[in-house]
Amino acid sequence: MGKVRRTRKPAPDGWELIEPTLEELDGKMREAETENHEGKRKVESLWPIFKIHHQRSRYIFDLYYKRKAISKELLDFCLKENIADKNLMAKWKKQGYENLCCLRCIQTRDTNFGTNCICRVPKDKLEEGKIVECVHCGCRGCSG
Ligand SMILES: [Zn+2]
Ligand SMILES: [Zn+2]
Protein backbone atom coordinates (compact mmCIF):
# COMPACT_ATOMS: atom_id res chain seq x y z
CA MET A 1 0.00 0.00 0.00
CA GLY A 2 1.16 3.49 -0.84
CA LYS A 3 2.44 5.65 1.96
CA VAL A 4 1.17 8.86 0.46
CA ARG A 5 -2.46 8.14 1.13
CA ARG A 6 -3.79 8.62 4.58
CA THR A 7 -7.10 6.82 4.23
CA ARG A 8 -8.14 3.54 2.74
CA LYS A 9 -10.86 4.85 0.51
CA PRO A 10 -10.47 3.70 -3.08
CA ALA A 11 -8.69 6.32 -5.16
CA PRO A 12 -10.24 7.67 -8.36
CA ASP A 13 -8.99 6.63 -11.79
CA GLY A 14 -5.63 8.07 -12.69
CA TRP A 15 -4.23 7.71 -9.20
CA GLU A 16 -1.82 5.03 -10.35
CA LEU A 17 -0.29 7.54 -12.78
CA ILE A 18 0.50 10.16 -10.14
CA GLU A 19 1.28 7.87 -7.23
CA PRO A 20 4.97 7.23 -8.12
CA THR A 21 5.75 10.96 -8.21
CA LEU A 22 3.87 11.58 -5.00
CA GLU A 23 5.68 8.72 -3.29
CA GLU A 24 8.99 10.14 -4.42
CA LEU A 25 8.14 13.54 -2.95
CA ASP A 26 6.92 11.86 0.19
CA GLY A 27 10.26 10.11 0.52
CA LYS A 28 12.08 13.41 0.12
CA MET A 29 9.84 14.96 2.73
CA ARG A 30 10.68 12.25 5.25
CA GLU A 31 14.35 12.66 4.45
CA ALA A 32 14.12 16.40 5.02
CA GLU A 33 12.37 15.88 8.32
CA THR A 34 14.92 13.47 9.68
CA GLU A 35 18.00 15.18 8.27
CA ASN A 36 20.68 16.31 10.67
CA HIS A 37 20.10 19.99 11.33
CA GLU A 38 23.32 20.66 13.16
CA GLY A 39 24.92 23.94 12.23
CA LYS A 40 21.82 25.21 10.50
CA ARG A 41 19.50 27.90 11.69
CA LYS A 42 16.21 26.47 12.86
CA VAL A 43 14.23 28.23 10.15
CA GLU A 44 16.58 26.92 7.49
CA SER A 45 15.94 23.33 8.41
CA LEU A 46 12.27 23.90 7.54
CA TRP A 47 12.94 25.26 4.06
CA PRO A 48 13.19 21.88 2.29
CA ILE A 49 9.87 20.89 3.84
CA PHE A 50 8.14 24.00 2.52
CA LYS A 51 9.74 23.41 -0.83
CA ILE A 52 8.48 19.86 -1.15
CA HIS A 53 5.05 20.89 0.06
CA HIS A 54 5.06 23.47 -2.72
CA GLN A 55 6.30 20.97 -5.33
CA ARG A 56 3.57 18.53 -4.49
CA SER A 57 0.79 21.09 -4.82
CA ARG A 58 2.37 22.45 -7.98
CA TYR A 59 2.48 19.01 -9.51
CA ILE A 60 -1.24 18.47 -8.97
CA PHE A 61 -2.03 22.05 -10.01
CA ASP A 62 -0.21 21.71 -13.33
CA LEU A 63 -1.72 18.32 -14.05
CA TYR A 64 -5.22 19.63 -13.59
CA TYR A 65 -5.18 23.26 -14.70
CA LYS A 66 -2.39 23.33 -17.27
CA ARG A 67 -2.06 19.87 -18.74
CA LYS A 68 -5.63 18.81 -18.05
CA ALA A 69 -4.28 15.35 -17.44
CA ILE A 70 -6.26 14.42 -14.35
CA SER A 71 -9.96 14.44 -13.57
CA LYS A 72 -11.77 16.82 -11.24
CA GLU A 73 -12.52 13.81 -9.12
CA LEU A 74 -8.84 13.04 -8.70
CA LEU A 75 -8.06 16.68 -7.98
CA ASP A 76 -10.70 16.77 -5.26
CA PHE A 77 -9.36 13.54 -3.86
CA CYS A 78 -5.84 15.03 -3.60
CA LEU A 79 -7.20 18.12 -1.87
CA LYS A 80 -9.19 16.06 0.59
CA GLU A 81 -6.20 13.85 1.37
CA ASN A 82 -4.06 16.95 1.91
CA ILE A 83 -1.73 15.90 -0.86
CA ALA A 84 -2.21 19.28 -2.49
CA ASP A 85 -2.77 22.49 -0.58
CA LYS A 86 -6.16 23.91 -1.46
CA ASN A 87 -5.46 27.40 -0.14
CA LEU A 88 -2.15 27.69 -1.91
CA MET A 89 -3.65 26.49 -5.17
CA ALA A 90 -6.47 29.01 -4.87
CA LYS A 91 -3.84 31.76 -4.71
CA TRP A 92 -2.03 30.48 -7.80
CA LYS A 93 -5.13 31.21 -9.83
CA LYS A 94 -4.89 34.90 -8.97
CA GLN A 95 -2.88 37.34 -10.98
CA GLY A 96 0.43 38.17 -9.37
CA TYR A 97 0.30 35.08 -7.18
CA GLU A 98 1.01 32.48 -9.85
CA ASN A 99 4.38 31.62 -8.32
CA LEU A 100 3.61 32.16 -4.67
CA CYS A 101 5.96 30.01 -2.58
CA CYS A 102 3.92 29.54 0.56
CA LEU A 103 0.98 31.07 2.36
CA ARG A 104 3.04 32.38 5.24
CA CYS A 105 4.73 34.84 2.93
CA ILE A 106 1.52 36.76 2.37
CA GLN A 107 0.49 36.80 6.00
CA THR A 108 1.52 40.32 6.88
CA ARG A 109 1.41 39.78 10.63
CA ASP A 110 4.31 37.35 10.36
CA THR A 111 6.80 39.88 9.04
CA ASN A 112 8.61 42.60 10.89
CA PHE A 113 7.34 45.36 8.69
CA GLY A 114 3.63 44.61 8.62
CA THR A 115 3.90 44.03 4.89
CA ASN A 116 4.26 41.08 2.60
CA CYS A 117 7.43 39.07 2.86
CA ILE A 118 10.56 40.30 1.04
CA CYS A 119 10.21 37.47 -1.47
CA ARG A 120 6.94 39.04 -2.64
CA VAL A 121 8.58 42.32 -3.59
CA PRO A 122 8.87 42.65 -7.38
CA LYS A 123 12.47 42.46 -8.60
CA ASP A 124 12.40 45.94 -10.11
CA LYS A 125 11.41 47.41 -6.76
CA LEU A 126 14.36 45.93 -4.92
CA GLU A 127 17.69 47.64 -4.48
CA GLU A 128 20.08 46.71 -7.24
CA GLY A 129 21.95 43.49 -6.55
CA LYS A 130 20.10 42.77 -3.35
CA ILE A 131 19.80 39.07 -2.68
CA VAL A 132 16.43 37.91 -1.58
CA GLU A 133 16.20 34.95 0.71
CA CYS A 134 12.99 34.63 2.55
CA VAL A 135 13.30 33.58 6.20
CA HIS A 136 10.09 31.59 6.16
CA CYS A 137 10.82 29.19 3.38
CA GLY A 138 14.07 30.20 1.68
CA CYS A 139 12.24 31.56 -1.35
CA ARG A 140 14.35 33.66 -3.70
CA GLY A 141 11.52 35.79 -4.97
CA CYS A 142 8.12 34.71 -6.18
CA SER A 143 6.24 37.82 -7.26
CA GLY A 144 4.70 38.07 -10.69
ZN1 LIG B 1 8.20 33.64 -1.90
ZN1 LIG C 1 8.81 34.70 1.73
Image (spheres, rainbow, N blue to C red):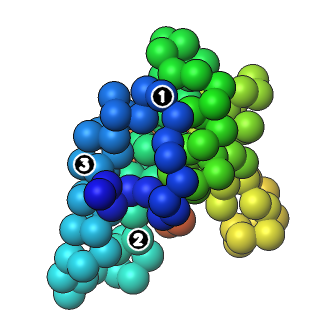
Q: CA distance from mark 3 to mark 2?
A: 19 Å
Up/down of 120 relative to 16, above or below: below
| Quadrant in which residue 14 is drawn | top left
Residue 21 appears in view:
yes
Q: Is residue 88 visible?
A: no
Identity, as a three-letter code, of the amino acid under mark 3: Glu
Q: Which residue is mark 1?
A: 13
**Which of the two residues, 40 or 4, is positioned nearer the viewer here?**
4
Contact between marks 3 and 2 (CB within 8 A): the answer is no
**Identity, as a three-letter code, of the amino acid under mark 2:** Leu
Label 1, residues with CA under 10 Å away: few <14, some 14-19, many ≥20 = few
Compared with 82, 42 (above or below) is below
Q: Which residue is mark 3?
A: 24
Q: Which mark is residue 46?
A: 2
Q: Reading the chain from its start, which is encountered first: label 1 or label 2?
A: 1
Does mark 1's beta carbon lie closer than 8 Å to ligand 1?
no
User: What secondary structure is found at the residue carrying circle 1?
Assistant: loop
**Is the CB of the residue bearing disc 3 within 8 angstroms of ligand 1?**
no
124 left or right of 13 in image: right
Packing grade of label 2 (10 A; few <14, some 14-19, many >=20) is some
Q: Secondary structure at mark 3?
A: helix
Residue at 78% across, 61% down = 108
Assess whether mark 2 and mark 1 are in contact (beta carbons under 8 angstroms).
no
Q: CA distance from mark 1 to mark 3?
A: 20 Å
